[in-house]
Image (cartoon, rainbow, N blue to C red):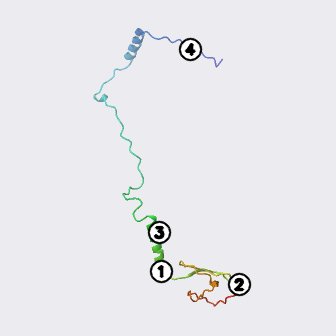
Amino acid sequence: GPTDRPDAAVALPLDDAETARVLEAMDASMPPAIEQENDAKNFAMRAKTVPAPRPGEIVKQPFPVPGTDEATLLAEACRLEQQAQATSALSVLRAGPVGEVKIVPQVTITFNQPMIPLQALDDGTDSDFQGITMSPNVDHLG
């Protein structure tokens, strides 16, 4: 059938005389080698592998750059913020409640600059003493 294999060939080693005869026949069929002056060379080693190029340029400066630590940057930011606040006029960003309300438990005002929180006015402190004036005048209920 198609899957049947033929018997393996019998391989016998050649004796010395037969081996010499085969090698002579091979030499006779090959053209003679032509020797040239530069045939003999030392083994050529390729150049050392160069590293891949890196993008950008190398900056010879310590890291982090002096003066850029967190405390210095924070101090500079605070100084700039205070300078900006000193040059801008105080203004109200939002106030509440808005509209007509019968009883107001508290009034909230947000300014464009940081403020020191004031105590609640219903603890008996005099609002005129703290430099607070309200317009229109509000009568205290209670």
Residue 109's image quarter? bottom right
Q: How far is the residue under mark 3 from the one under mark 1?
A: 18 Å
Q: Which mark is residue 86?
A: 1
Q: Which mark is residue 1?
A: none
Asked whether the beta carbons under mark 1 and mark 2 sit within 8 Å of each other, the answer is no
Amino acid type for the residue under numbered disc 2? Ile
From the viewer's perspective, tell me whether residue 106 is left or right of residue 23: right
Asked whether the beta carbons under mark 3 and mark 1 sit within 8 Å of each other, the answer is no
Q: Does 49 sit above or below residue 97?
A: above
Sequence-wise, the earlier of marks 3 and 1 is: 3
Quarter containing the C terminus: bottom right
At 39% from the left edge and 42% from the top edge, which residue is drawn? 49
Q: Which mark is residue 103?
A: 2
Amino acid type for the residue under numbered disc 3? Leu
Q: Residues within 10 Å of mark 3 (few under 14, many from 20)?
A: few
Residue 56's image quarter? bottom left
Residue 7 in the image: x percent, y percent?
58, 13
Mark nearest the camera among 4 and 2 is 2
Sequence-wise, the earlier of marks 4 and 1 is: 4
